[in-house]
Image: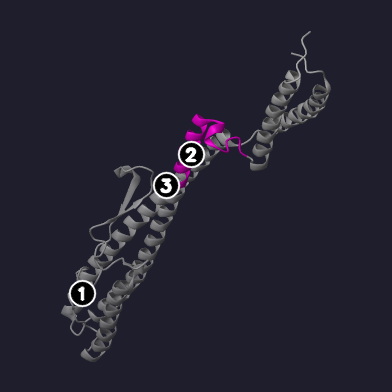
């Protein structure tokens, strides 16, 4: 057998195998400590790309859910104002019915009724002027052209839900400044107030239906997010049992490799 005084081939092989073992053990430790099977694109380029795409999709789902909740909050604010306006118009109608009674009402009593009637109409218009959500006026005609909430991931009409609220001030509701100082004026006010109530209730019904739709949308987004998260977890999360077994194996090989390297370094350097 030829003897080399330059190269210890056995030692080089032992060093190379020990380096591989050390690298493998480092990967096991990294995966177990992070809880992720994919910590960088190099771990699995294809799965890493899919996982990143799914993560972006998840973020979009959560934002769409927040958008939907914003839409519900806006609707609830609008509906609350319209509820108060409905109560006001109902009271105004009650006053008009009372003033229309020619048998018991005189001009003085009608004057008292009219005073409350006019104050209520002013309050109705005040509510219209101050009702807003996040700085946006809601029932003064600002939303008559409609606004849309992005409740999906894509740029399609199906990913948006529109909300429209027309101007709800007294003029738009058809209240033409009738006075209750006469039975004729009171009778005309009754008809106008009936129409105003119908308009308000129609708007409230549309808003209620839209709120229900948004609530179903949120529920569906939650299911989609849950399923997407589960799929992404299967792609990138570590298999603890597998990695623990792999690390134990690497530790055994590392200990054996260290021992073998020591023995190889003491051998004659045979070519």
Check residue 207 for magenta coloring: no
Image x and y of residue 105, in percent: 24, 86
Distance of mark 2 from mark 3, alpha carbons? Answer: 25 Å
Which mark is first along the chain, 3 or 2? 2
How many numbered callouts?
3
Seen in the image, is 135 located left or right of residue 48? left
Pick whichever, 63 or 40, lies toward us.
Answer: 40
Q: Quadrant of residue 28?
A: top right
Disc 1 marks which residue?
Answer: 189
Q: Is residue 203 left or right of residue 47?
A: left
Q: CA distance from mark 1 to mark 2?
A: 64 Å
Secondary structure beneath dot 1 equals helix
| Residue at the (20%, 78%) spot, across then down | 186
Please tell me whether residue 93 is drawn above or below residue 161 in the rendered image: below
Q: Mark 1, residues whose alpha carbon is within 10 Å: few (<14), some, or many (≥20)? A: many
On the image, which quarter does residue 14 sit in?
Answer: top right
The x, y position of residue 179, in whole percent, is 19, 81
- Label 3, on which residue? 217
From the viewer's side, name the closer residue of 32 and 177.
32
């Amino acid at each position: 057998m030829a003897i080399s005084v330059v190269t210890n081939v056995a030692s080089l092989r032992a060093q190379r195998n020990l380096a591989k073992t050390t690298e493998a053990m480092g990967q096991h430790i990294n995966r177990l400590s992070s809880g992720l099977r994919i910590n960088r694109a190099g771990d699995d380029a294809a799965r890493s790309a899919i996982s990143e795409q799914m993560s972006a999709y998840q973020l979009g789902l959560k934002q769409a859910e927040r958008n939907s909740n914003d839409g519900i909050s806006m609707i609830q604010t609008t509906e609350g104002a319209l509820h108060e306006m409905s109560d006001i118009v109902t009271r105004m109608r009650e006053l008009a019915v009372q003033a229309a009674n020619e048998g018991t009402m005189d001009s003085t009593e009608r004057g008292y009724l009219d005073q409350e009637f006019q104050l209520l109409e002013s309050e109705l218009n005040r509510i219209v002027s101050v009702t807003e959500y996040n700085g946006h006026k809601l029932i003064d005609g600002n939303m008559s052209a409609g606004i849309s909430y992005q409740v999906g991931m894509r740029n399609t009409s199906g990913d948006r839900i529109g909300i429209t609220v027309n101007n709800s001030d007294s003029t738009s509701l058809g209240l033409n400044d009738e006075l209750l100082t006469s039975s004729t004026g009171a009778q005309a006010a009754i008809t106008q107030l009936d129409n105003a109530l119908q308009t308000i209730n129609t708007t409230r019904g549309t808003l209620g239906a839209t709120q229900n739709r948004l609530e179903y949308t949120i529920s569906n987004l939650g299911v989609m997010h849950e399923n997407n998260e589960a799929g992404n977890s299967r792609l990138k999360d570590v298999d603890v049992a597998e990695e623990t077994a792999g690390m134990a194996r690497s530790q055994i090989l590392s200990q054996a490799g260290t021992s073998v390297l020591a023995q190889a370094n003491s051998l004659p350097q045979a070519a």
